Image (spheres, helix red, strand yellow):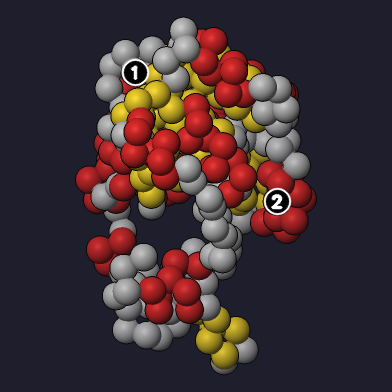
Amino acid sequence: MCETYRPFLEKGTAMDGKSRLHLNGKPLTQFSTHSTFAEYAVVPEQACIPLDPEVSLDAASLVGCAVMTGVGAAVYTAQVRPGETVVVFGCGGIGLNILQGAALCGAEIIVAIDTVPSKFDSARMFGATHTINAKEDVRQGLLDLTDGRGIDHAFDATGNPSVQENAIYSLRRGGALILVGVAPHDARVSIDTFRMHHQETRVLGCFYGTGNCQRDFPRMIELYKSGRLRLDELISRKSPLNEINEVYADMLAGKINRGVLTLG
């Protein structure tokens, strides 16, 4: 994390060190200085991006994280090329968008892996060509799908250190493991560095899909309008704000792709 931004990301204050949210006269902090479930918020001018009036707020609301992070991970961080092979560990909102990002890049084999098989229908809708239950022999399954060569790009969308440690063994020579899911701050992994040396594998961090909001949000909207990017299909549940706890419970249980909260 850039030290310039660390205090603001961790304390939830704006760039001038002050909070823009208050409750009963006391300042509130929020994740990444701006996220909130309040009805109104004060945001920096440079963080505001004009919205195409033809696009619904429901669809547009998803671009800010799940879509930008997932699609950007494939397009910008990994720079997946046509004909390459991809595996995605975790088929939540982020994982699904990594899948469709890989499909946009022209990947030939796109494998979705999860512990909840019911997610695989959505995974195939968003671009997966194959699926593997995480409870099975994943490494062997990936070798079988690639004629023993291994995978070019392995994406972790779980943030689970044990998944990250094992994902690197699915890579072919020169392949890359991309860490997209957010692990706990104190998480540590143990990696076979000799194998990395011998196989020339890489580990890449991915923050927000290596994206540029001013550049990429309009691009995502144009891809959506042209039918090349799925947004509406991400929404599994639309609920009023007072059902936020139920929506979070569904998300944690793997019952939904993404939930949209409304003030109505």
Q: Secondary structure at mark 1?
A: loop
The local secondary structure at tag 2 comes to helix
- Quadrant in which the N terminus appears: bottom left
Residue 36 placement (x, y as % from top left): 53, 65
- As rendered, which of 105 and 234 lies closer to the eye? 105
Circle 2 crowding by C-alpha within 10 Å: few under 14, some 14–19, many from 20: some
Which quadrant holds residue 137? top right
**Disc 2 or 1, which lies upstream in sequence?**
1
The amino acid type of the residue labelled 2 equals Tyr
Q: Is residue 262 above or below residue 171?
A: below
Q: Residue at x 52, y 72 (%)?
A: 30
Q: Is residue 51 above or below residue 24?
A: above
Q: Which residue is mark 2?
A: 248
Residue 157 percent location from the top left of the image: 53, 41
- The Cα–Cα distance between marks 2 and 1, rounded to whole angstroms, is 35 Å
Q: Position of residue 200 (x, y in %)?
A: 31, 34
Q: Amino acid at mark 1?
A: Glu
User: Taking 109 as reference, is 258 above or below it?
Assistant: below
Q: Nearer the viewer, residue 108 or 54?
A: 108
Q: Residue at x 38, y 74 (%)?
A: 6
Residue at the disc numbered 1: 84
- Residue farthest to the left, as pictured: 215
**124 sits to left or right of 155:** right
Residue 74 numbered tag: none
Task: Answer with left or right where residue 242 lies relative to residue 193.
Answer: right
Residue 44 spot, x, y in % from top left: 31, 69
Which residue: 67% across, 28% down?
134
Q: Report crowding for label 1: few under 14, some 14 to 19, many 20 or more residues within 10 A (C-alpha).
A: some
Can residue 226 be seen by looking at this rendering?
no
Task: Tell me the residue at 76%/49% (across/down).
Answer: 249
